[in-house]
Image (tube, grey):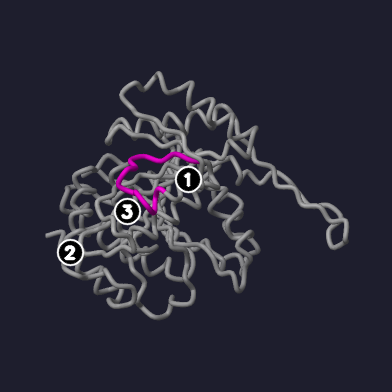
């Protein structure tokens, strides 16, 4: 029997609960499809930071390198550890070390879920550059605490980085409905975003079967609200993609349905899969966290591993669950009830 080794990092808050829920479903789907998932759980989290002074051990990256994939719950405990520490101590190092430059987030309404828009028939795949751009971490502060203090945050855009994420976006559009929206703010950012637009135009002739349109980010944000059904694949920089995908989560019914994948496209290192909703420490003890986003992320993991039939089985189970009214209203159904319904729908 084929087996895949999965690193589980439940993290903080509801991350622990939703990861356990997703694992229950994923193991069942794997068994039905004739392969095995073998997990190794790591306690790396803000609690780990409080105990050790690090979000993960010094050899954490090398420890993860041998796994087939990583399933992450959620990281963050802002009351105890600043988000700037937790993010830069765990999530971003993994993305960068494993060259997970493509962040993929699907946005569509599951059956039975009511979104805030009149539009229902949309299916948007957002591709966010994941390793450079506005989140490069380049910059600093001088004269701290004085009236002369200066803070500088420098965005880094490389030709290699921009071209590879755009090509990834073109390829995704080619495999879907053949439409790509490339997002910048080149009327205001005359260096980095003009650079992005130029590379988009340069690559477009390589994909004659894809209709590419360049949008300013504010216009694209409005289009996601007013005409989401007009969009297919959206590709954007790290910051713009981060913001736009929260709009995507909102129009698909909320963060409880927002799945994501951090992909290393050439498979030279493991990819990482995680829900977008964060650790939600205020509800972590209530037992009402929605595991659907994590289960959906797990389905994306199975698909990436090549187990497309199992991934499809999980997605059909999710759709059957929400179509039955379970997991469609925040706080109505307990985590274990949603999990049990999805697991039952696998059969």
Question: Residue 252, how many percent across, how many down?
Answer: 33, 58
- What is the CA distance from the residue labelled 3 to the residue labelled 2? 20 Å
Instruction: State the residue position of label 3.
Output: 298
Element under label 2?
helix
Query: Which residue is depicted at the point 31% across and 42% down?
Result: 305
Instruction: State the residue position of label 2.
Output: 323
Query: Which residue is depicted at the point 50% across and 28% down?
Result: 163
226 part of magenta stretch = yes
Taking 8 as reference, is 117 left or right?
A: left
Q: Nearer the viewer, mark 3 or mark 1?
A: 1
**Magenta stretch bounds:** 223-236
Are the two marked residues, 1 and 2, in contact with CB atoms closer than 8 angstroms?
no
Question: Residue 318, how many percent across, how many down?
Answer: 22, 59
Q: Quadrant of residue 126?
A: top left
Which of marks 2 and 1 precedes in the sequence? 1
Question: Residue 306, how many percent across, how many down?
Answer: 27, 39
Element under label 3?
helix
Element under label 1?
helix
Which residue sits furthest bottom?
286
Query: Which residue is depicted at the point 52% across and 41% down?
Result: 237
* Up/down of 38 relative to 306, above or below: below
């Amino acid at each position: 029997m084929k087996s895949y080794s999965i690193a589980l990092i439940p993290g903080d808050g509801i991350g622990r609960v939703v990861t356990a829920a997703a694992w229950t479903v994923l193991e069942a789907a794997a068994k039905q499809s004739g392969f095995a998932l073998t997990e190794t759980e790591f306690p790396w989290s803000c609690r780990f930071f409080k105990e050790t002074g690090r979000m993960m051990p010094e050899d954490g990256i090398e420890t993860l390198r041998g796994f087939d994939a990583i399933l992450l719950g959620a990281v963050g405990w802002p009351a105890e550890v600043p988000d700037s520490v937790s993010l830069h101590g765990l999530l971003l190092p993994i993305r960068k070390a494993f060259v997970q430059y493509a962040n993929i987030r699907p946005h569509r309404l599951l059956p039975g879920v009511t979104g805030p828009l009149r539009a229902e028939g949309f299916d948007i795949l957002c591709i966010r550059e994941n390793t450079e751009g506005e989140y490069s971490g380049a910059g600093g502060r001088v004269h701290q605490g004085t009236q002369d203090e200066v803070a500088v945050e420098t965005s880094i855009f490389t030709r290699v980085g921009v071209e590879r994420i755009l090509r990834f976006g073109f390829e995704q559009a080619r495999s879907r409905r053949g439409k790509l929206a490339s997002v910048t703010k080149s009327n205001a950012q005359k260096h980095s975003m003009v650079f992005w637009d130029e590379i988009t135009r340069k690559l477009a002739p390589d994909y004659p079967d894809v209709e590419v349109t360049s949008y300013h980010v504010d216009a694209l944000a409005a289009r996601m609200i007013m005409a989401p059904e007009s969009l297919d694949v959206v590709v954007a920089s790290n910051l713009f993609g981060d913001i736009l995908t929260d709009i995507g989560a909102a129009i698909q019914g909320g963060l409880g349905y927002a799945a994501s994948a951090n992909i290393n496209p050439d498979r030279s290192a493991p990819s990482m899969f995680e829900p977008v909703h964060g650790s939600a420490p205020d509800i972590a003890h209530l037992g009402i966290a929605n595991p659907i986003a994590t289960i959906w992320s797990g389905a994306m993991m199975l698909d990436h591993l090549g187990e497309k039939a199992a991934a499809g089985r999980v997605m059909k189970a999710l759709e059957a669950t929400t179509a039955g009214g379970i997991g469609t209203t925040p706080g109505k159904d307990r985590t274990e009830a949603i999990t049990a319904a999805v697991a039952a729908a696998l059969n």
